[in-house]
Image: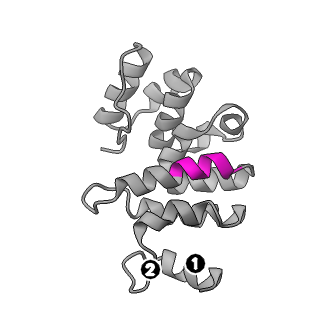
Amino acid sequence: MSIRAIRVLLTDPMRPGSPEPALLPWLTARVTETDLPLMAAAAAAWRERTVGWPVVADGVADVLARRVRDPAVITAAVAALPPVAGRLRDVLLRRVDWAQVSSEELGYAALADGRLLAEALRRAASRALRTVLAAAAAGEPVPPSPTLSH
């Protein structure tokens, strides 16, 4: 199967012939950097617990954060799969214009870098996000894989 065929299948995860969701982290480790946002978008389709595969999205987010370097690709990956922001470190965090992202994306980044907490709290759009960020700001434990969008 060609990467072109895989790209088509990844745009609709319910399409017959689409890769098993459990393969997405493996595929993410093998595609070109320019295809990483596509992998983020595919993983986002499996992110909600009602679909049943949030662990796949977490695995893809981990691989993306290790592989991505290009600022445009970072921004696109974070926009498609916000938990990627929580896995970025150091230089990669500084490559994103946090003023241009959603409150959820900023929230995940703030959990990775406390310097972003004040801005994330100010912009928090949901009660769940405010609760998690307030706990982090107070030095309290945060759930290991919080969902900040609800």
Q: Which quadrant of the view contains residue 47?
A: bottom left
Is 120 placed above or below 58 here? Answer: above
Tell me the residue that label 1 is attached to: 7
Which residue in the rendered view is the most extreme toward the top?
Answer: 138
Name the spot of residue 123 as percent of width and height, x first. 45, 32
The residue depicted at 36 percent of the width and 26 percent of the height is 142
Image spot of residue 51 (x, y percent): 28, 63
Look at 36% across and 38% down and name the residue there.
146
Magenta stretch contains residue 63: yes
Question: Toward the viewer: 72 or 67?
Answer: 67
Labels 1 and 2: the sequence-earlier one: 1
Looking at the figure, which quarter contains the C terminus? top left
| Residue 14 figure quarter | bottom left
Q: Which residues, given as a range, are shown in magenta?
A: 61-68
Residue 40 on the magenta span: no
- Look at label 1 and name its amino acid: Arg
For label 2, the residue is: 18
Query: Residue 97's x, y, as percent?
Result: 66, 40
Check disc 1 and report its element: helix, strand or loop: helix
| Front position in the image: 122 or 85 | 85
Eye-nearest disc, 1 or 2: 2
Helix, strand or loop at label 2? It is loop
Q: How far, Cα to Cα, is label 1 from label 2?
A: 10 Å
How many residues crowd around disc 2 within 10 Å: few (fewer than 14), some, or many (20 or more)?
some
Residue 149 sits above or below residue 130 on the image: below
Find the residue positioned furthest to the left: 50
